Image (tube, helix red, strand yellow):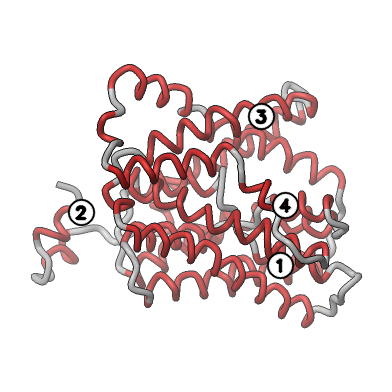
Amino acid sequence: MDCRGRDYALAGTGACRESCPVISPGDVIASVLPVYLLIVAGAVLRWLKIVRKEHDEGIMRAVYTVMLPCYMLDKILGSDVLKSGTVVFSAMGLGFGLILAGIAVGLMVGKIIGLEKGTGMRTFALAAGTQNFGFTAAPVVEILWSTGALAMLFVHNIGVELAMWSVGVMIMSGERGIRWQKLVNGPVVAVAIGLVLVGLGWDDSITGAPRKAMSMIGVGAFPLGIVITGCTIMDLVATEKPNLRIVLGASVVRLALAPLIFLSAAKFLPIATELKQVIVVQAAMPAAMTPIILARLYGGRPAIAVQIVVFTTALSLFSLPWIITLGCRWIDLKPLLP
């Protein structure tokens, strides 16, 4: 029986706290280091020109339209926690709400460091306030918490996607309106189908060869996606020079203030344990790449978003273990130790 199993067996006795090891930053580093090594591998492959820019679109098209949906559906099927409508909607709601909180903090810090509308304020707020919720986050969630929390992350991300393509687009463009068509994509459709099957109790009937084939198709989605992320970061490093005011301000938002908000939500809100686990990992994530896309599409300042992604990703290798460790101790969560 692992530590979490003993929690239930020894609840109220205090014995589990004495017998279970306390998570440390070193434990977290040992667990998540493979994810960062894949990012480095992608950067090296790009530098060596083994994976070229012209390869990216085809690889990511296969990942987003086929491999990732298969992976997500495979993990959602059989997830008992997602049978509760309250849990599902709270996950989506927090995904939406915490992004808005991060952006609000980004706006506040942007003003403090002297940014204004027209000089990168909106891009800064969106980039600094939005955590990575995809290729970097999912492997970390699975490594630390296993399949239940991973299924919860995929549902949580529906709320994040909605926030990005509604409020995010309106902030970046200054226009009103929601880009609903952006929400009709492979991952969102996979989550929707999975939730319907789980809700109807039909998920247990998807077994045998079809389920195995789906799992085999999806297993490479995140390794490939992370490698391409590393390639993209290498491209960004080579094209943009850092602005100290921008990168320091963004680091404060993304790696200090936003994590405090996220961890407080996980600590004090009456939500499922799996959702708490997801939020702890989300608190520790670096900036997402989606704001770079939004800045390019809707008249923002892509250079600002690029700097924020590159520097928060680099710094997160050092900050992530501490944020997750302190968050787990404060909220009383016990990850799977290496």
The secondary structure type at the circle numbered 3 is helix
Q: Quadrant of residue 224?
A: top right
- Residue at 37%, 77% (x, y): give it: 268
First-in-chain label (4 vs 1): 1
Label 3 vs label 4, nearer the camera: 3
Of tags 3 and 2, the one toward the viewer is: 3
> Circle 3 is placed at which residue position?
61
Q: Are marks 3 and 1 in contact (CB under 8 Å)?
A: no
- Residue lying at 31% horizontally and 28% vertically, measured from the top left: 206
Image point (55%, 27%), residue name? 66
Residue on which the image places disc 4: 310
Residue 197 % position (x, y): 35, 40
Q: Are marks 4 and 2 in contact (CB under 8 Å)?
A: no
Q: Earlier in the sequence, mark 3 or mark 1?
A: 3
Residue 54 x/y as whole percent: 79, 25
Which of the marked residues, 3 or 4, is nearer the chain's N terminus?
3
- 100 left or right, relative to 282: right
Amino acid type, label 3? Arg
Which secondary structure, mark 4? helix
Q: Which amino acid, mark 4?
A: Val
Residue at far bottom of view: 112
Residue at 39% over, 57% down: 88
Instruction: Residue 300: give x, y in percent of width and height.
Output: 85, 59
Q: Which residue is mark 2?
A: 3
Question: Dot 2 lies on which element?
Answer: helix
* 302 versus 220 height, above or below: below
* Labels 1 and 2: the sequence-earlier one: 2
